[in-house]
Image (cartoon, rainbow, N blue to C red):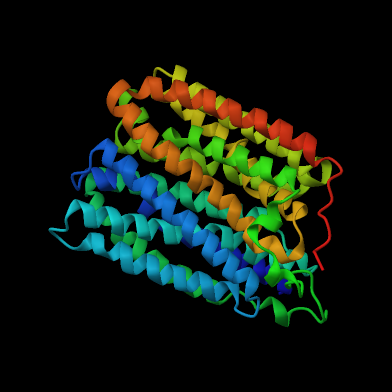
Amino acid sequence: MKIEHRIEWNYAGAQSSFWIGHCALTGYTAVLLGVRGFSDVQVGLTSSLMSVLTIVFQLLISNFSDHHPRIAIKKIITVLYLLAMATGGVLLAGGVPVALMMIAFALSGAFKNTIVGLFNALVMQYVNADIPVRIGWPRGVGSVVYAVCAYVLGRALEIYSPDILIPTFLCTTIVSITLVLLMPDVNCLTDRSTPAFQQDQNAARISYRQMLTGNTPFLLFLLAGVVLYIGQTTAFLFLIRVVKSRGGGATELGISMFLQAVVEMPIMFMTPWILKRFKPANVLVVSFFAYALKTFLMLISRSMGMVYIAMSLNMFSFGLYCISSVYFVNSLVRPGERVRAQGLISLCGSAGGIIGSAFAGAVLDSYGIQVLLLINTLISLLGAFIMIVCNKSSRGYVPSPLPN
């Protein structure tokens, strides 16, 4: 088997196990915490705390990784998995105060969320080393596995209880650790003396301020990402409230999550073909408007059928965003900044989550789901227009040389 094929299959397995654990831990956040006595406001605050911690971890860990290239990214990911297991396991104990559960859940989710950016950086190392690895289909397989898991867990929640979620998360994390550690060391796959994925000799002296100064397209993309994730809070965190308001339950929630994930795979398979014909920035503009349309369809829905149609738009929203954003950001920064840049993409989601989760919980309790969906539709549209400006500013942009 060629090395690139081995990497792709290994990465597909790592993605699949990651998303099963992610679905079990955070896919049913409102359900998992709700049965433990959390109100909507407390669920929103817990999600906001998770986002705050994710930002802190992403900044620290991606900066550490960029400045210590001899420490393999897969080892850093393994440590994060172990920390997520240790903190998530607290929720298995009985009689735990709400405050402690809030902190433990937020920590576990934050450690998991931090891995997303590192996964992107891990696979882009092979691409930057001129190994012809395709990242679209392995990520697509992860989406299909997430979809199946969401449906199965939705059915299982009705038959059993939300108590199955944490054990599922812990078991799949053990598999994830094994598969990540099996990823080949990129330094052993190339005879280049200074491969493209390796840090520039001056990279350790580059701060986040220097990295972002003068890089207008990157700054605009980060801003667009923050706004987008604020607007998508309902679909991410309070989808159960949308489903219940349209007459559904745990099974319908599982089907909705299944549809969101399963439709991503075809477009992810097509991503290499799409990016050969269209610039990543143009693809991202389409993705942002698809997010806005998805939220709008949830707003005007009157039945689960319309909700399912809205969920299917994830093909063009996250399906296009997932891979295109990685390539787009990779083209905007210098070699010594790529791990931090990928981490900042995930950080945008966390920053948007901080604002969106706290805001959404309060609005939901005070005004209801329809008002929240209307506000989120308008916010998503704002993110799409910022992406248009980002697209225009990125035309002809070339990262400046590293300072001497």
| 178 to 257, vertically: above or below | below
Residue 222 position by quadrant? top right
Residue 313 position by quadrant? top right
Q: Is residue 309 visible?
A: no
Tell me where residue 94 appears, x and y as whole percent.
Answer: 14, 60
Tell me where residue 395 appears, x and y as whole percent.
Answer: 83, 40
Q: Residue furthest left?
A: 95
**As drawn, is 42 to the left or to the right of 255?**
left
Quadrant of the snapshot with the C terminus:
bottom right
Q: Is residue 206 visible?
A: yes
**As drawn, is 16 to the left or to the right of 156?**
right
| Residue pictured at 73% horizontal, 32% vertical | 389
Tell me where residue 282 appears, x and y as whole percent.
Answer: 75, 36
| Residue pictured at 72% horizontal, 69% vertical | 203
**Count of numbered circles in the view:** 0
Q: Nearer the viewer, residue 50 or 211?
A: 211
Q: Nearer the viewer, residue 203 or 61?
A: 203
Q: Nearer the viewer, residue 310 or 96?
A: 96
| 44 to 385, vertically: above or below | below
| 316 to 64, vertically: above or below | above
Quadrant of the snapshot with the N terminus:
bottom right
| Residue pictured at 46% horizontal, 23% vertical | 375
Tell me where residue 303 appears, x and y as whole percent.
Answer: 39, 20
| 280 to 188, vertically: above or below | above
Q: Residue furthest right?
A: 396
Q: Nearer the viewer, residue 277 or 36?
A: 36
Residue 48 position by quadrant? top left
| Residue pictured at 55% horizontal, 29% vertical | 380
